[in-house]
Image (cartoon, rainbow, N blue to C red):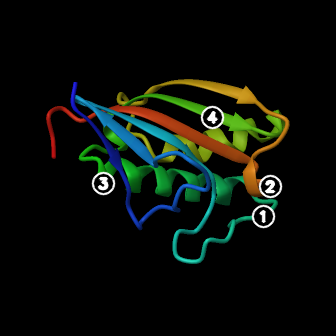
Amino acid sequence: MERSQVSTARAPAAIGPYAQAVVAGEWVFCSGQIAIDPATGALVGEGDVAQQTRRVLENLAAVLEAAGSGLAEAVKTTVYLVDMQDFAAVNEVYGSFFAAGSVPARATVAVAALPRGARVEIDAIAWRGGGA
């Protein structure tokens, strides 16, 4: 199976030994994104999980687009939260990024901490449909 790494300046660079995403055949496997502004490298929305979720999904969309896919082609996401009290706020923003009828399967997991003090991280698996 053909396999390639994806990298785009429209999302933050990996902060460890991993790719922003890997394309394997018609599938895109995205690493988790946190709320880092790719232009500044700074965490955005400190203390504001809704603002962080928006930035996370914008970053994830940029990685998927660089891979020849998009949020509409996402089939599975995992949401990592440091505080399950943030679930409703994250859900509200998350829902605004996906059209009704095309939401992916999802798991939400509570974690002790995330890199850079982020409150939310999201990863994804998406279909490329033989795209770019």
The residue that disc 2 covers is: 117
Q: Residues within 10 Å of mark 2 (few under 14, many from 20)?
A: few
- State the CA–CA distance, disc 1 to disc 2: 8 Å
Q: Which residue is mark 1?
A: 46
Q: Are marks 1 and 2 in contact (CB under 8 Å)?
A: yes
Q: Earlier in the sequence, mark 3 or mark 1?
A: 1
- Mark 1 or mark 2, earlier in chain: 1
Kind of residue indicated by mark 4: Val
- The quadrant in which residue 116 appears is bottom right
Residue type marked 2: Gly
Q: Nearer the viewer, residue 116 or 95?
A: 116
What's the residue at 35%, 30% (across, down)?
Answer: 102
Residue in front for this viewpoint, 50 or 117:
117
132 sits to left or right of 123: left
Which mark's residue is nearer the viewer, 4 or 3? 3
> Could you tell whether 61 is left or right of 111 in the image?
left
The mark found on residue 94 in the picture is none
Q: Is residue 5 left or right of residue 112?
A: left
Amino acid, disc 3: Ala
Answer whether labels 2 and 3 touch (C-beta < 8 Å): no
Report the residue at 63% width, 38% height from top: 91
User: Residue 58: x and y, percent?
Assistant: 48, 57
Image spot of residue 112 (x, y percent) = 85, 36
